[in-house]
Amino acid sequence: ESTLGAAAEQSGRYFGAAVPAGRLSESAYTTILNREFDMITAENEMKMDATEPQQGQFNFSRGDQIANWALQNGKQLRGHTLAWHAQQPGWMQNMEGSQLRQAMLNHVTQVATHYRGKIHSWDVVNEAFADGGSGGRRDSNLQRTGNDWIEAAFRAARAADPGAKLCYNDYNTDGINAKSTGIYNMVRDFKARGVPIDCVGFQSHLGTSFPSSYQANLQRFADLGVDVQITELDVEQGNNQANVYGAVTQACLAVSRCTGITVWGVRDDTSWRDDNPLLFDSSGNKKPAYYAVLDALNGG
Ligand code: G3I
């Protein structure tokens, strides 16, 4: 196959990209997006600050732009993200306790209800674990409402949109390390107690090297009975960029429950990073990394 999406579909997987609403009016951009990708994530437009700028007053206009473009063009949608310590609206940032818990749950319910039936997978909770060796939770206003805030968010999301797969999503979890093991233990506990969780997202914002335990890490989560996905892939430009992209793709293909890969942007000039980490250069040309991914998806 000659596009990323079609090549991924050969094994029943998807290949997605994160998209900012502002690019949907640029035809050079949407030409690539429409041709190559079959799953769309809103880069910022479905986050808490975007969707509930004033408490109880929801604004879905920019999120809907992305959702409508995706559905009109036959793409699936990943929802990103219902509950996160970052990009909270100002009114939420200084809330605490039961008031915050209730506001968070209402947010999850309202946003998941608005997009009900349109979302393949939701990143229900994003980046709730701490970096470093503790394996524990990140401190945040949400965490301080009680350790059960994550499962409460998942239950609210399931009630609001029973058809969406519900994912936990995080970064620096791309190999076996203390942080990914902390998440592994949470997912194992959720499965044991019947907390609704269907998938785990590995963001995979990578530097110049490929974590040696990458595939084994995906596999250990899959063995818990959840799907796994690469959700925000980008890789530092350099001699090894194509190799790392190819290795990530092969690792996903080797894990039957790894159901898809999303890159965190289309062209280098649209990336949140300044080290040209994507598959297309700023002019929209395919880079060596593109061909490494395509070849891997095609079984080469
Ligand atoms: O739109 C406003 C603009 O009006 C304003 O003038 C400008 C001034 O700062 O800010 C613009 O908003 C920025 C927004 O991107 C859109 O460009 C925000 O400041 C900026 O913080 C925001 O950055 C986003 C970042 O998440 C926020 O945490 C990045 O685009 C986005 O790529 C990044 O994505 C995250 C994932 O959600 C979670 N995982 C990590 C990943 C990378 O950081």
Image (cartoon, rainbow, N blue to C red):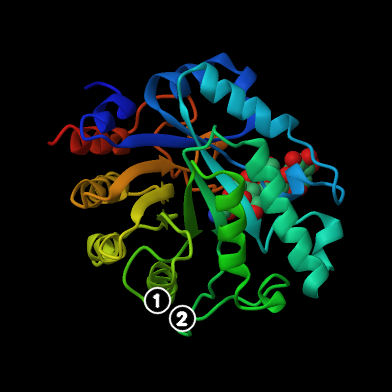
> Mark 1 — residue?
185
Q: Residue at x 63, y 44 (%)?
A: 112
Q: Residue at x 55, y 42 (%)?
A: 79
Q: Residue at x 77, y 63 (%)?
A: 102
Could you say where residue 229 lies in the image, as x and y percent from the top left?
37, 50
Neighbour class for label 2 at 10 Å: few (<14), some, many (≥20)?
some
Q: Amino acid at mark 1?
A: Asn
Residue at the left extreme?
Answer: 300
Q: Residue at x 26, y 45 (%)?
A: 249
Could you say where residue 29 lies in the image, as x and y percent from the top left?
52, 22
Q: Secondary structure at mark 1?
A: helix
- Which circle's residue, 1 or 2, is located before the other in the chain? 2
Which quadrant holds the C terminus?
top left
Vertical relation: 91 (above or below) 33: below
Q: How many marks?
A: 2
Mark nearer the viewer, 1 or 2: 1
Vertical relation: 144 (above or below) 205: below
* Residue 217 figure quarter: bottom left
